[in-house]
Image (cartoon, rainbow, N blue to C red):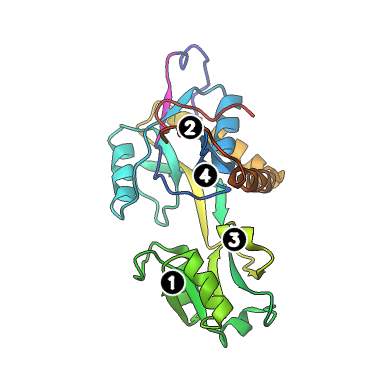
Amino acid sequence: MASYSPALYATETMILGGGINVYSPPYRWFDKCDGHLTGSVAHLIDKVLTQLEIDYQYTPSAPFKPEILAQFDQQMLAGNIDGRATNDIKPIPGIIYSKAPISSIKISAFYSTQTHTISTMDELKNLKGSALSLSLKKSRFSPVQNFLQRNELPFELISTQEEAIKAIQSGKIDYVMALRYSELLLSKKYFKRYDIEEPVQNFYFAMSTNSPFADRMEEIDREMQLANTSGLVDFLEQRYLLQWFAENDRDCTESTAKTTESIKLSRQ
């Protein structure tokens, strides 16, 4: 690996893909009052790049559509962006990936406090499950649906969390499988949850081999691995979960446009 020279990178700014504007606390979301990107993943990336004295900025975020993920990869291969967070399952030639995940998606089965107790995976096979899908269509991009199908657990699709809550309370379904840090956590008095121990999806830091920062990837990955082994990743997720709860109770006097263009995570 080439040696690092501060002078060499003094005028360089790493361009990171702003990703999709999906609300996914505690990992990544936009502060509803000031519009700034926040969350555990944004904090971790900021900490690592700042520590390595790498200046960076994000491109604008984009609305989600299935083809957008492939477009991000093409932008990296074309040299339009240097790096991004990705959940690519199959490595793409021309892109290098961190060995350590920068976040892991975890899911839980939420069920009524008034009925049964779920303590094993086998019990789910005898219950009526559900998963959230706004379009009420099965999707190979859904880590929750993929988990249910892979484990041969019967389930139906429900469009919103509100409908899932009503369906559970009426006995139409026994549980809804959802992201562990979903808004269902705000309804603690109505629900208990059974946590799936293994992550259903990992996210990694990816870098284009055409990037002028490609030779810094070894350093970046080293810091990412340290963040995992030290417990920092888990700590940040818990911290931003609490921040997300607090934000739900906060009123904003004005609305700020949500964008990641030319901004950095506010120093914590």
For the point 31% across and 55% down, the residue is 66
Q: Which residue is mark 4?
A: 28
Q: Amino acid at mark 1?
A: Ile
Quarter location, residue 250: top right
Report if the CB atoms under discs 2 and 4 are less than 8 Å apart.
no
Q: The residue tagged with tag 3: helix, strand or loop?
A: loop
- For residue 249: magenta? no
Q: Amino acid at mark 3?
A: Arg
State whether residue 97 is above or below residue 135: above
First in residue order: circle 2 vs circle 4: 4
Percent across and percent down for residue 199 are 57, 61
First in residue order: circle 3 vs circle 2: 3
First in residue order: circle 3 vs circle 1: 1
State whether residue 87 is above or below residue 98: below
Judge by depth and name the residue closer to the eye, 99 or 35: 35
Is the residue marked by circle 2 packed among few (<14), some (14-19), or many (20+) residues within 10 Å? Answer: few
Q: Which residue is mark 3?
A: 180
Q: The residue tagged with tag 4: helix, strand or loop?
A: loop
- For residue 13: magenta? yes
Percent across and percent down for residue 193 are 65, 69
First in residue order: circle 3 vs circle 4: 4
Q: Which residue is mark 1?
A: 158
For the point 56% across and 77% down, the residue is 168
Q: Which residue is mark 2?
A: 254
Q: Which residues are magenta?
A: 11-16
For the point 38% across and 64% down, the residue is 134
Kindly give the residue lying farthest to the bottom in the view shown: 126
